[in-house]
Amino acid sequence: MTDGNESLALDAIRKKLVGKKLNYEELYAIMDQISSKKLSNVLTTYFAASGYSKGFSNQELYYLTKAMVETGEKLKFKGIVADKHSIGGVPGTRTTLIVVPIVASAGFTIPKSSSRAITTPGGTADDMEVLAPVTFTREQIYKIVEKTNGCIVWGGSFKIAPADDIIIHVEEPLLFESFDKILVSIMAKKIAFGSNHVVIDLPYGEMVKVHTIKDANILKDKFEYLAGKFDIKIKVLTHRTDEPAGRGIGPILETREAIRVLQQKENRPVDLEIRALNLAGNLLDLCLKDSSEKLKNDVKKNYGNSIGWATNILQSGDAFKKMQEIIKAQGGNPDIDSEDLQPGKHLFEVKAKKSGTVKQIHSKNATIVTKVLGAPKQKGAGIFLNKKIGEKIQKGEIIYTLFSENVYNLKEGKDSIVNFPIIEY
């Protein structure tokens, strides 16, 4: 493909803006121009907006994913390559830091490419960065995975689906992603990372990206269609979500909760543990189907099923040991304890003005306020939910706590909660 791609890309964007369908050559031209940074941010935004308003056909989604993969670098691993991805939009739900070490500890390869924050106050890459570096070359990733079976790295650290990260950058100020863009972004990264057994965590609800079960099922069908086109075994888990699975929102607070689960601490968030075990169990199940009869029989005999297997790996401490190995291989300090992870020293406790029961947690408002507090750049910025849905509150009790690394951001955060209430009771 030559520099004729520039005029072809411009024509294709015009075409898409008026609702016409694009072929592979046109979508390749757009991805090529974006990934080589020859298309301005304005034109990239026009393309992102055209996908948001007009959507893409299944055939276009296939072409777009293929073009996104082909215009970047690719990784190849032998045999079963596991992966999981959450659609996101739920702050404070950091399952990846628990699932990856469980699956790697079970003996499967799980090179996890993660994103930085788009619509939440911290992506998995922002959180993992609390523990270890996340930016590596392709060769370095191979070495980390060879040592440990897994990694948790930033997908944009080298040219894996490079157009995706540029599109994410133009979408970020608007806090939106189209469903089609979410789908392509996830699948392109999985394909480029060589994944062939993938579990997708697809929450829906009033407070998350996907609002209805109907939309969740449409997205599920599209994931299954794309997975089929690229010969990937996939399982899409849809479930209603009304609040974060943990209590901490923001990089350090979220990471601390994941480490508490791995260390099996008394104060760990049990709902986060249950969500992570469900994902890990389903992913192990998918991998087990293509494993030896001996392994299948061993799992059945010793643990009953894959969720039992995942639970054993977690409760025995093997998952935490594996996480320490991954942290060390990625250049972090493996001698980590969850309680070493302390949020910003400037804090403000929000107290109940009346007694009652928590009815709702406004995740979008929590996201906005956490960003105002300085996340994800300030790793210690965030919100700790002292109360969650269904829990009783007495007048004067702390309902949530704001944390920041500086006084200015804390003041801004305090001012923001007037217009962006977080807990309704």
Image (tube, rainbow, N blue to C red):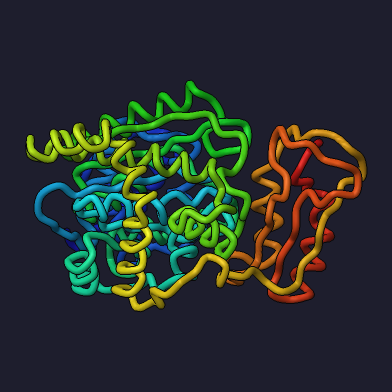
Q: Residue at x 22, y 37 (%)?
A: 302
Q: How many marks?
A: 0
- Foreground of the two, 362 or 100: 100
In the image, is 7 to the left or to the right of 259? left
Front-most of 420 and 407? 407
Q: In which quarter of the image is residue 109?
A: bottom left
On screen, residue 98 above or below 73: above
Q: Position of residue 210 (x, y in %)?
A: 52, 34
For image coordinates 61% across by 71% down, the residue present is: 378
Q: Is residue 102 visible?
A: yes
Q: Considering only vertical position in the picture, is 337 above or below 293?
A: below
Q: Which residue lies furthest to the top in this view?
A: 214
Q: Nearer the viewer, residue 85 or 56?
A: 85
Nearest the eye: 298 or 16? 298
Q: Residue at x 23, y 69 (%)?
A: 144
Quadrant of the drawing holding the N terminus: bottom left
In the rendered image, residue 238, in percent from the top left (x then y), is placed at: 43, 29
Where is residue 329? Give x, y as percent: 29, 73
In screen coordinates, is 320 left or right of 117? left
Point out the image quarter for the C terminus: top right
Residue 170 appearing in the image: no
**Spot occupied by residue 387 in the image (x, y as percentages of width and height):** 73, 45
Residue drawn at the location 85% of the way across and 49% of the way down: 397
